[in-house]
Image: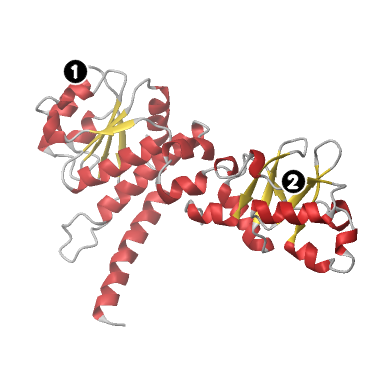
Amino acid sequence: MSGILAEAERVIGIEARALDALARNIPADFEPAVQAILASGGRVIVSGIGKSGHIGAKIAATLASTGTPAYFVHAAEASHGDLGMITRDDVCLLISNSGETAELGDITAYTQRFSIPMIAISSRPDSTLMRAATYRLPLPPEPEACAIGMAPTTSTTLTLALGDALAVSLMNHRGFLASDFQVFHPGGKLGAQMARVAAFMHTGDAIPLVPATAHMDEVLLTMTSKGFGTTGVLDTDGRLAGIISDGDLRRNMAGLMDRTALEIATRKPITMGPDNFAAQALAVMNDKKITALFVLDDDNRPLGILHLHDCLRAGVA
C-alpha cells in the first residue's frame, strides 16, 4: 500500500473508532435535549465559529429538511444585531470543540438572560460553554486525525454525527413521513424520485382505452394514435379487464382481425395507484421489461397511463 493510501486508511480508522466510541456512550442529556426541542414552540437556533460553524450550518439544514424548523446564526454577527433572530420560544444549539469560543459569549449570555434552553456540544465537559448549558452533549475524548493533532477532523465528524442523531430522533418522534420529506425537497433528482405517479401520468383522452367488444381494427387504431404501444380493455362497468400490448398482437397473429379485444387481452395486468412513488413504478417497469403502466383508482377504473419515458425525462432513476 502506498504512503498516501496508508494515510487515508489511518485517518478514516481514527474517525471510525471515535464514532464507535460515541455510539457506545451517547450523552446522558441527549434524550432530554430531544424532548426540549419537541416541547418548544419555536426553532432550533444553531451557532458556532470556524469549522464548528460549518458543521452547525449543515446540522441546521438537516433539521429544517426533516421537520424541525431550524436556522443557523453566525456567532459574530449575533453580537451585531442578529441576536434579534432568537426568540424566547426557540432552543439554541451552540457548538465549540474547546467550549471557550469567545464569539459565543454573547449568545450564551442572551440565552441565560431570557431563559432560552441551550444545548452545548463540546469536547470539554468542564468548559465555560458546557457549564452554562441547559443540556450538555460532550464528545468522547478521541484524538484528532491530523498528523499534528490540532486540525478539526475527528471532532467535527463526531459533531456532525451527533447532529444527525438529533435530527433523525426528532423526525421519528414527529412521525415525519416520506410524503413530508418530498414537500421540502421538490427540486432536482431527489424531488423527482419522491414524486407520485399522479404527477407524471397522462389522463383524459390521452389514455388508450377500448371496450371489451371492440374489433381489432379499432384496437390497432387506438394503439397507433395514442402512441403508448398498448391499450386498456374496459368491461361494461368501465373497469380495466385487461390490456393489449404489441407482444399480445404478435402472439395472436393467426386470425387476429376476426377476434375482439377481450379475446386477446392479457388479464390481470400489472398496474399502479396514483399515490405510488414514480420511482417505484419505474422499478416495476424495468423489472418486468414493460414500457407503460395503467394507473387505476380503488375501483379498478383507469385514471391515467404512465410511460417509462415520462419517468426518465423527469429524472426519476
Q: Residue 39 placed where, x, y %?
A: 41, 22
Q: Residue at x 49, y 30 (%)?
A: 174
Q: Quadrant of residue 101?
A: top left
User: Does residue 313 appear to the left or right of 297 in the view shown?
Assistant: left
Residue 209, labelled with which disc? 2
Q: Under tag 2, what secondary structure?
A: strand
Residue drawn at x 40%, y 30% is 32
**Residue holding disc 1:** 113
> Residue visible at 23% across and 35% down?
130
Residue 193 seen in this snapshot: yes
Identity of the residue drawn at 9% across and 27% down: 80
Q: Quadrant of the N terminus?
A: bottom left
Viewer-proximal residue among 222 and 171: 222
Asked which quadrant contains residue 184, the reply is top left
Q: Where in the figure is residue 10, as x and y percent of width and height?
A: 29, 69
Q: Amino acid at mark 1?
A: Arg
- Residue 177 seen in this snapshot: no
> Which three-letter amino acid code belongs to the residue tagged 2?
Leu
Could you tell me residue 247's position as x and y percent? 75, 65
First of labels 1, 2 by sequence position: 1
Mark 1 surroundings within 10 Å by alpha-carbon count, few (fewer than 14), some (14 through 19), many (20 or more): few
